[in-house]
Amino acid sequence: MMKIEKKLYTATVNVQGGRDGKAVSDDNNLNVDLRYPKELGGDGTGTNPEQLFAAGFAACFQGAMGTVLRKKNIKTDGINIASQVTLGKDANDGFVLAITMDITVKGVETSVAEEVVAEAHKVCPYAKATQGNIEVISNVVG
């Protein structure tokens, strides 16, 4: 297990009501109604944990890619990550997650983008936390 040696930031979010409740950060910058998606029997009028995880993972991973790009002195015309988090069941009928990221790195060769993505998996705390725990697929699509 990796342990934090130096704290940089701690996010604090209060959740009440679980998947059919509300999530509010201590600074109120995050203030969302949580709802089951229609596919799970909900009305789909709020966000859900999978959407929040998809956004958080992609944002963090894009930041890690930026770190790798700066270290390698590689310039791009922008990065886009389309992130999909899937909630499913495993062979024992337990809940599991998987994430797929379709990554576009504008203005660089595909081989360079693939190298940056591979290194970003070693930098991104979300990627490190999920490694070996859930399926993570990174597709360089452009």
Image (cartoon, helix red, strand yellow):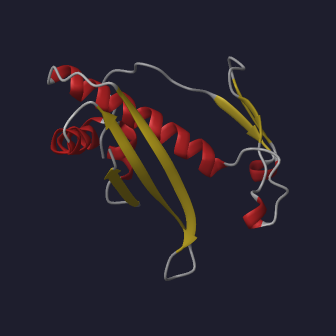
> Residue at the location (75% across, 52% down)?
19
> Residue at the location (37% across, 44% down)?
103
Q: Residue furthest bottom?
A: 91
Q: Is residue 43 above or below residue 75?
A: below
Q: Is residue 28 above or below residue 55?
A: above
Q: Position of residue 76 (x, y in %)?
A: 28, 25
Q: Position of residue 109 (x, y in %)?
A: 19, 39
| Along the line of sight, the residue nearer the viewer: 57 or 79 | 79
> Residue at the location (28% across, 43% down)?
121
Query: Is 49 left or right of 57, judged from the image as shown?
Result: right
* Quarter of the figure with residue 66: top left
What is the tally of numbered marks visible in this picture?
0
Query: Is 131 left or right of 32, judged from the image as shown?
Result: left
| Along the line of sight, the residue nearer the viewer: 115 or 30 | 115
Q: Position of residue 91 (x, y in %)?
A: 49, 82
Q: Is residue 18 above or below residue 33?
A: below
Quadrant assignment for the C terminus: top left
Query: Is 133 left or right of 98, judged from the image as shown?
Result: left
* Quarter of the figure with residue 120: top left
Q: Is residue 50 above or below residue 16?
A: below
Q: Position of residue 40 (x, y in %)?
A: 74, 66
